Image: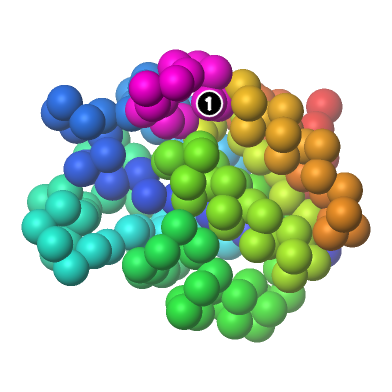
Amino acid sequence: MHTAVLVIDVQQGLCEGEGAAFDCDGTISRINLVTRKARVAGALVIFIQHESESTYLEYGSGAWQLAKCLEVESTDTTVRKTTPDAFLRTELETILRRRGVGRVIVCGMHSEFCVDTTTRRALALGFPVVLVSDGHTSSGNAAISAQQVIAHHNATLTNISSFGPRVHAVTAENVNIAACGSVASR
């Protein structure tokens, strides 16, 4: 079973300035660790970029660009999206099916929006998910802190069983992508 890493919305507008998510630098460092492992194993790395029609995350704007410290290679794929669901009205599912991907690794921003929605949709489409437990982040909200949002999603998403495929939360360090592209934890 081939694997793809989905790096969701790690964009300058979400990583810099007043609206920056919690621990962006650390999160990006851990995402880079996972994508390096994926490339060594020959797994597909897909960067997903959210865009809006307003000036915030407008296509081509500085805020829309991938975060500066994110390691991107010419062999990686990019998918543009306009909703929290990276599969909705995008070519993501087609790319995964054509490449024979049967499992996805999910990381990125924001835990409670695009990471959550894309993870649930992946499950609904039959893709088991490895959630990089320390590789997604949030800005938090008026009710709970960013750390609480992250912990909540690590616990909640791994408890979903109704789709059939499951979510397994694994730290970036413990993501192990075998040469055949399968994923396991140590």
Magenta part of the chain: 137-150
Instruction: Find residue 147 and report its horizontal and vertical position in percent.
Output: 50, 17
Query: Crowdedness of circle 1 by 10 Å Cα count: few (<14), some, many (20+)?
Result: many
Q: Nearer the viewer, residue 141 or 157?
A: 141
Residue type at numbered disc 1: Val
Q: Is residue 18 at least partly visible in the picture? A: yes
Instruction: Find residue 43 and report its horizontal and vertical position in percent.
Output: 63, 58
Residue 8, placed above or below residue 17: below
Q: Which of 153 and 104 is in front in this view?
A: 153
Instruction: Say which residue appears at 46% left-offset and 79% top-offset.
Output: 89
Q: Nearer the viewer, residue 153 or 137?
A: 153
Residue 154, placed above or below residue 91: above
Task: Locate residue 148 relative to residue 8 in the image: left or right.
Answer: right
Residue 10, placed above or below residue 64: above
Instruction: Find residue 81 and report its horizontal and vertical position in percent.
Output: 38, 67
Residue 158 painted magenta: no
Question: Residue under circle 1?
Answer: 149
Instruction: Say which residue appears at 58% left-offset and 61% top-offset.
Output: 44
